[in-house]
Each structure stands twice: as C-alpha cells, then as structure tokens.
Image (tube, helix red, strand yellow):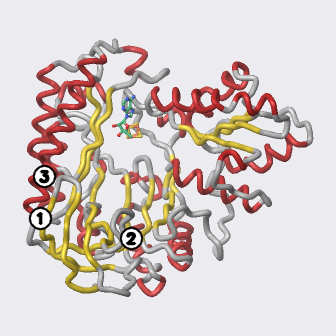
Amino acid sequence: MNKLDSELAAEALVDAGHVVVDDESDADTVVFNTCSVREHAEQRVLSRLAQLRGRRESDPDFRLGIMGCFAERDGEELLGRLPYLDFALGTRQFLRLPEILADLDHGGAVRGLFGDADVEQHGIDLAHPRQRHSGMQGFVSVMRGCDNWCSYCIVPSVRGGEVSRPAGEIAAEVKALALAGAREVTLLGQNIDAYGKRDGTSLAALLRRIDAEATADDGLVRLRFVTSHPRDISRELVETVAALPRVASHFHMPAQSGSDRILHAMGRGYDRAGYEAKVALICDVIPNAGIASDFIVGFPGETDDDYQATRHLVETSNFTNSFIFKYSPRPGTRAAETMADDVPDLEKRRRNNDLLAVQNAVNESRGRSLVGTRQRVLVEGVSGRDARRWLGRSEENLICVFEVPEGADWTGKLLDVEVERATALTLYCRPLGLA
Ligand code: 5AD
Ligand code: SF4
C-alpha cells in the first residue's frame, strides 16, 4: 500500500509540473513515505531526516517532508520538535502534496494536514495512469483502512476505518493499467476480504467483474490480491479464485500466532483450529494453492509453550513464505496500553531466528516436492547476474529461473516451465512453451 501511495504522490506532483529525479542529491524536495507498523521503521525515518538536516539548514530552497502513517500518528509533534521538517501529510492527505508545496513557496503557514479525506479522488488520468516503478506490475487499492483493531496494530488508528471503492472504478483502473503495459495487477487492501461488505458485494464479485472487464486482449495476464484476514476468507472467494485462471492461486493469510491464548489476546477472532480450517478449505478447493503467512513473536505474555505452538503451525502448514516480526509496542494500541512487553528482546530475536530457520526448511522441502512439476510463470526479464538466465514468478509467487532461446524476448509473457531443481528460494526450470 505504501508503494502505491508513493506512486500516487509522485503522480500528483508530476501532474502539477514537478519532476521526479533518480538521485536524492538532485532533488530540491525530499518526501519520505513512512510506516508506523513497528517502531524500527519510525526510527529509520528519524535518522534519514537527521541526515538531511544540514542540507535543509544551508539551502533555503530545499524542502523536507514526510507523508503516510508516521506523519499521521506523530506529524504535529514532529513539526514542533524538528524545525528542519517543512511539512507532514497524513495517510489520507498526501495527494495535497503539490498544494502544500505551492503554499510553502508563497509563505503559507499550513505545514501539517491530517485526518479524513477521500484519497481515491486522485483523478487518474486513464491515458497515463501512474508513475509506475515497474512497468509490468500495477497496484490498485480496492479498499483502505481496517476495522479489526487487532490489539497490537496501529493500522486502524493511522489509516482509519474500512472504506471500499466502487467496483466500476476499480475495474476501469485495472483495465487502464493493463492497456498502459501492466501484465500483473495486485489488488490491495489492509483487510481485502472485507471488500464491499457494507455495500452487499464481495471480493469474489469484484474479481469476477475485473476478470470480465479487463480481458487478456488488454494485456492483463495475472491478478493478485493482498492481504486476507483468515476469518473473512469464504468458500465463495476460494471457488472464485479456482474458477478464474488469471487470478493467481496464492493467498497471503497471516496467522500471527499458533497459540490460542495469544490469538485471543491479539483479538484476531479465530483460534488455531479456525485458522487450520481455512487452510484446509483453500487446499480442498485448490490442492496446489500457495499460502503465505505473517507471524509476530514475543507478543506480551508469550511463553515458550505458546511459541512452540507457532513453530508447530509453521512446521506443518507448508507455507510458501512466512514474514516474521518481533513484537513492537505501538502507542495507543490495546496491547501497548494494557499488556506488559515482557518477552526480553534477546528471546524475541531467538524465536524470530528459530522460526525463520523452520520456514527455510519448509521452503527447501517444498522446493524438492515441486521438482518435476509444471508451473506457469510470468516472465519478468533477464537476470541481473547472468544474461542467459531469465527470471519470472510462479502463481505461488516463487522465483523461477530458466534459459530463453537466443534472440527471444518473452518479457511480460506467460510461460509454462518444468521444475528441474530447487533451492529454498529459487526454482530452476526448463521452458516448455509460451502459454
Ligand atoms: N509489532 C510487530 N509486528 C507487527 N505487525 C503489525 N503490528 C505489529 C507490531 N506492533 C505485523 C503483523 C502484520 C504485519 C504487516 O506486521 O504480522 O501482519
Ligand atoms: Fe492491523 Fe491487519 Fe489486524 Fe487490521 S487486520 S488491525 S491491519 S493486523
């Protein structure tokens, strides 16, 4: 979502006549798009701002700003505390970047804009959508915000409540991105399975509509969606993913923990058996689906037994990937306000490394089990390291490497391959033919 927001902000600036430069030293304005999910991300922004302080103080034309979650959470205070910070724009205000820069040029006094606004009114130019970083991949936000209030999470308070976009607008944007060269579009929502809940529609209906409106003739060959809350994954959704060949059979469905006690304290709304039932539902409908998960280790009160339950879940679930985080207390969240951060950092680190090793072993055995199978790969381009090797991604989002015949350019095409060899992170394949 932050990547998309950076692109939208860049687009708004370019529309207003600004130019995006590759090198920070060529810029007369630097804006950091910030994250607040863990404290570490905020610390990094503060140190990056401090690095630019000297330049800001010696060059009166240079401007320094922040946007996004940290700006929303703490912008007012940061503007007071850091005199070299020119402006801060919250999670739903960043499209006013050109406006605040123009105001500052004219001696305007407003330096912070926060709170609610309709971020989707970005007036996408359907002929030139987005300042995209990768021509082949597009991001489209389908909903923003979250109503779940998991006890550890800052997202509902910095990004606000769930707001879904109209399906017609989303389908038109996907089509426009495809016509502009995107081959794969990822639909984004903090809690995407709740899409349209209040309007009597659903993510499944949205996927069907996009699939019908943005056809392969437009160039769209693959659709993905993130992130799924386990509680909200429905049979209808899974069956829709199975029925639409262009929708990748891959679910990012964070478990966060394998311990019922901890899941309850996290306020996740399911227990371990509930999570496993969703995994079983997905595998029942789509036997070779990929599922990736997120985990937090060292949540308040997490005992070794609780951690072992998480470890067991990773050992047995065959995830394509696990994103593992050490618990970080976030101001204002229920966990930070009412539960002691009582797992020592050393122990958090130990559990983090241990769980990474478990997932790595899962990746290795998963890779081995894929040798000999056929995979459908979206070809991304030539490998940076070896010009004869090409890279692409499977539906499960695994990196595939293969050789392409002399002179052929398969970039952006779907290719069927057979897996010949695998490591934990890469499948080495033999091309069978374009799909
Ligand atoms: N501390 C550590 N990790 C967190 N996440 C969310 N909040 C916190 C926190 N306070 C993790 C969750 C989520 C991912 C995006 O970040 O695992 O799924
Ligand atoms: Fe945060 Fe995700 Fe929970 Fe929403 S569902 S509160 S974004 S962890």
Residue 330, how many percent across, how many down? 45, 24
- Binning the other alpha carbons within 10 Å of mark 1 as few (below 14), some (14 to 19) or many (20 upward) gives some
Disc 3 residue type?
A: Glu
In percent of width and height, residue 58 lies at 81, 30
Residue at the far right in the pictured view:
106
Location of residue 250 in the rendering, given as x and y in whole percent from the top left corner = 27, 60
Which residue: 17% across, 18% down? 303
- Is residue 197 rendered to the left or right of residue 262? right
Viewer-nearest residue: 26 or 4: 26
Secondary structure beneath label 2: strand
Q: Amino acid at mark 2?
A: Glu
Amino acid marked by disc 1? Leu
User: Does the residue at mark 3 contact the one at mark 1 (Cβ under 8 Å)?
Assistant: no
* Quadrant that contains the C terminus: bottom left
Instruction: Look at the numbered disc 1 and give the secondary structure of its residue.
Output: helix
Residues at marks 3 and 1, CA–CA distance in whole angstroms: 10 Å
Circle 3 is placed at which residue position?
364
**Residue occupied by mark 2:** 380
Q: Earlier in the sequence, mark 1 or mark 2?
A: 1
Which mark identifies residue 175? none
Residue that mark 1 sits on: 370
- 181 vs 266, left or right, is right
Would you identify the image quadrant in which residue 56 lies? top right
Q: Which of 181 and 54 lies nearest the eye of the viewer?
A: 54
